[in-house]
Amino acid sequence: MKTLILGGTNEGRDLAELLVTDGHEVITSLAGRVRRPARIAGEVRVGGFGGANGLAAWLVGNGIDRVVDATHPFAEQISTNAVAACRSTGTPLLRISRPSWASHPLADTWTWVASHDDASREAAGYEKVLLTVGKQSLDHYRNLPDVAARMVELPEEPLPGSWRPLLERGPFTVDSEKELLRDLGVDVLVTKDSGGSLTEAKLTAAADLGVRVIMVRRAPVPKDVPQVATPREALAWVNEVPA
């Protein structure tokens, strides 16, 4: 039986390792936005599918028995395409969803917004912005003059001249995040509900220093798509779902 993992996250990489170790045939698909992805067990393909119809045809043409969507919580287009493609082909689909920060003890102190455009408007009232929304969403914030933007890699489009790029990859500690916020003189942190613990330290650091947090909500997963929180739970699902 063959499993397609829509990857690009630590969860997807960990699941591929678990499945290969368990004797499964696995293909992990990456969008190709990161130039040097970490090693992934099993077969790896890079690039898009050509929309939901293209993905559906690819699933059938490659004999895929089940799909696990382990993309980032904000990779909304591929997740939407996966739902449509799996529905049309009858392919079982599972979503690995990192626990949202909506239940974080500090969540009630943040300004929650529905979109990056809303976040940009909220942030316009502050002087120094730390932006941690990833390189794919930076265009929504180009109106902001004084920004430190943290990302893994630079985007193809040049950043505004007044911005300061911070090329870093988590995990981070509360102490290092507090040092960064102090050194930059940040008065607002703009981020998105990525969830999990890898980059959570910035939220505690911001609270400790009185830095405002603007949080972009994630889109809900369709109710008919089963969800798990961990790669090991996804492994159990793969082993239980009939071919």
Image (tube, rainbow, N blue to C red):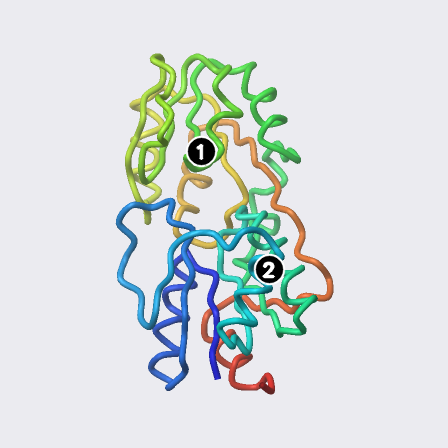
Q: Is residue 61 above or below residue 158?
A: below
Q: Which numbered mark, 2 or 1, is in the foreground of this view?
A: 2
> Residue 9 shows which numbered tag?
none
- Residues 80 and 239: in front is 80
Per the image, label 2 sits on a secondary structure element best described as helix
Q: Nearer the viewer, residue 194 or 153?
A: 153
Residue depicted at x 58% and y 37% = 216
Above or below for 42 versus 125? below
Percent coordinates x, y for residue 93 in the rendering: 60, 69
Residue 206, which numbered label?
A: 1
Residue 241, quarter of picture: bottom right
Disc 2 packing (10 Å; few <14; some 14–19; many ≥20): many
Identify which residue is drawn at 31% across, 37% down. 153
Residue at the image position 37 percent from the left and 21 percent from the top: 159
The percent coordinates of residue 57 (x first, y second) are: 57, 64
User: In the image, what residue type sits under mark 2?
Assistant: Ala
Q: Could you give the CA–CA distance between mark 2 and mark 1, rounded to whole angstroms?
A: 36 Å
Report the label total.
2
- Give SS at disc 1: helix
Q: Can you say which quadrant of the picture contains the C terminus?
A: bottom right
Q: Position of residue 37 (x, y in %)?
A: 29, 53
Please tell me in which quadrant of the rendered image residue 41 appears: bottom left
Relative to 85, say whether 61 is above or below: below
The reply, left or right, for residue 194 in relation to residue 149 is right
Image coordinates of residue 242 in percent, x first then y, are 60, 87
Q: Which residue is mark 2?
A: 82
Q: Amino acid at mark 1?
A: Ala
User: What residue appears at the point 51 percent right and 74 percent down from the top-left corner?
Assistant: 234
